[in-house]
């Protein structure tokens, strides 16, 4: 599965706060026709209602919503923030990478999480994502796992 496209990766993005960062990552999914704008609103609502559960590892947030909230196609977006942002997680803040995912069903959601964990769980790959200036390099890391 081609999880990530060049158009859904942005490096060195200026984010104002956690909600703004979630919206920036979500807008990449909307622009790529992977999700409706309602999906981005649902990701923000999940964060504001439930809290920073989406900060799954030090420096990494994975916002998402339920498929029925506006998912069109399975997809992933990644933004690397210029300056890390506090999301309110006691041990994994501040966040440097926001990786929004959209799944059309439960199995696609779980498969994406599996692929994402392979990339983020690899120190060399994570270092590359945090330092490269080449968006294509990031795309290859996710699509060749």
Image: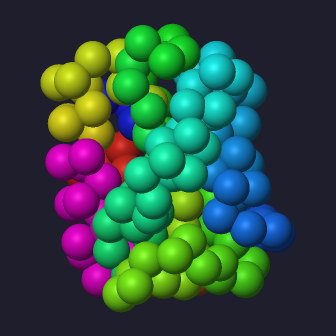
Q: Which residue is found at the position 56% from the left and 40% from the top?
A: 45
Task: From the top left corner, tell me how far across and down residue 9 is, in percent.
Answer: 63, 50
Drawn side of residue 44 relative to residue 51, left or right: right
Q: Nearer the viewer, residue 43 or 57?
A: 43
- Quadrant containing the N terminus is top left
The correct choice, above or below, for 42 with respect to 9 in the image is: above
Task: From the top left corner, tell me how far across and down residue 142 is, in percent.
Answer: 38, 51
**Number of residue marks:** 0
Task: From the top left corner, tell me how far across and down residue 47 is, in percent.
Answer: 51, 51
Q: Residue furthest front?
A: 49
Q: Image quadrant of residue 35?
A: top right
Drawn side of residue 124 relative to residue 23, left or right: left
Q: Image quadrant of residue 110?
A: top left
Q: Which residue is found at the position 64% from the left and 21% from the top?
A: 38
Q: Nearer the viewer, residue 102 or 139?
A: 102
Residue 125: in sight, yes or no? no
Task: From the top left corner, tell me how far across and down residue 26 is, in percent.
Answer: 64, 39
Residue 117 is inside the magenta segment: yes
The boundaries of the magenta stretch are: 113-126
Residue 67 is inside the magenta segment: no
Main secondary structure type of the part rendered in magenta:
helix
């Amino acid at each position: 599965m081609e999880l990530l496209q060049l158009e859904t990766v942005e490096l060195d993005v200026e984010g104002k706060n956690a909600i703004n960062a979630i919206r920036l990552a979500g807008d990449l999914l909307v622009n790529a026709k992977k999700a409706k704008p309602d999906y981005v609103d649902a990701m923000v609502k999940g964060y504001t209602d439930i809290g920073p559960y989406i900060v799954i590892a030090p420096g990494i947030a994975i916002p998402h919503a339920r498929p029925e909230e506006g998912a069109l196609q399975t997809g992933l977006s990644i933004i690397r923030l210029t300056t890390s942002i506090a999301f309110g997680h006691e041990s994994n803040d501040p966040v440097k990478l926001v990786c929004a995912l959209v799944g059309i069903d439960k199995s696609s959601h779980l498969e994406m999480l599996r692929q994402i964990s392979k990339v983020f769980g690899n120190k060399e790959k994570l270092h590359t994502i945090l330092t490269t200036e080449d968006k294509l390099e990031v795309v290859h890391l996710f699509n060749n796992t």
